[in-house]
Image (tube, rainbow, N blue to C red):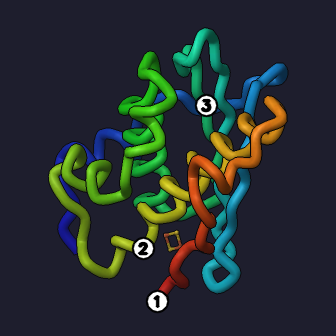
Amino acid sequence: MIYSEKVMDHFANPRNVGEIPDADGVGEVGNAKCGDIMKMYIKVNDGIITDVKFKTFGCGAAVATSSMATELIKGKPIEEAMKLTNKAVIEALDGLPTVKLHCSVLAEQAMKAALADYYTRQGIDPKMILGDLSTPESCEI
Ligand code: FES
């Protein structure tokens, strides 16, 4: 399996790893088949994602995609973060092997779950904004 240099870099030196104790939104998703778990924390100020951190018990591709996802939404308005897809994350990483594409879904779902939690805490039904959050695709391993 060939990984791009960017994937290897984000896997070896993941950005924004950790937790935010006083986060404004926390999302946790898991994949029942491979057992990988992803947790994402966001801090929001005036509609801007001022900080984001993640923790994962997952494969290398899950680490690299979450690392890149956090980089792409940090400092951005919430509206922009909501539009971030796993496809954009994969493009930013110069691609992922096909059998690992589903791992990037975990990163997207964790981020959306954190945003949904943020909206819930604001007293807003997240379904009105984010729609129904589907569960991550299963891992074919
Ligand atoms: Fe399950 Fe990568 S997220 S193998």
Q: Earlier in the sequence, mark 2 or mark 3?
A: 3
At a point 67% along the width and 43% down the height, the residue shown is 114
Query: Residue type at mark 1?
Result: Glu
Q: Are marks 2 and 3 in contact (CB under 8 Å)?
A: no
Q: Are marks 1 and 2 in contact (CB under 8 Å)?
A: yes
| SS for callout 1 | loop
**In this orientation, which residue lies closer to the viewer: 114 or 4?**
114
Q: Residue at x 83, y 35 (%)?
A: 123
Q: Which residue bears the numbered disc 1?
A: 140
Task: Say whether residue 116 is left or right of residue 90.
Answer: right
Q: Position of residue 127 (x, y in %)?
A: 67, 56
Which amino acid, mark 2?
A: His
How many neighbours does mark 3 have within 10 angstroms: few (below 14), some (14-19), or many (20 or more)?
A: many
What's under tag 3, amino acid-wise? Lys
Q: Position of residue 2 (x, y in %)?
A: 18, 68
Q: Which residue is mark 2?
A: 102
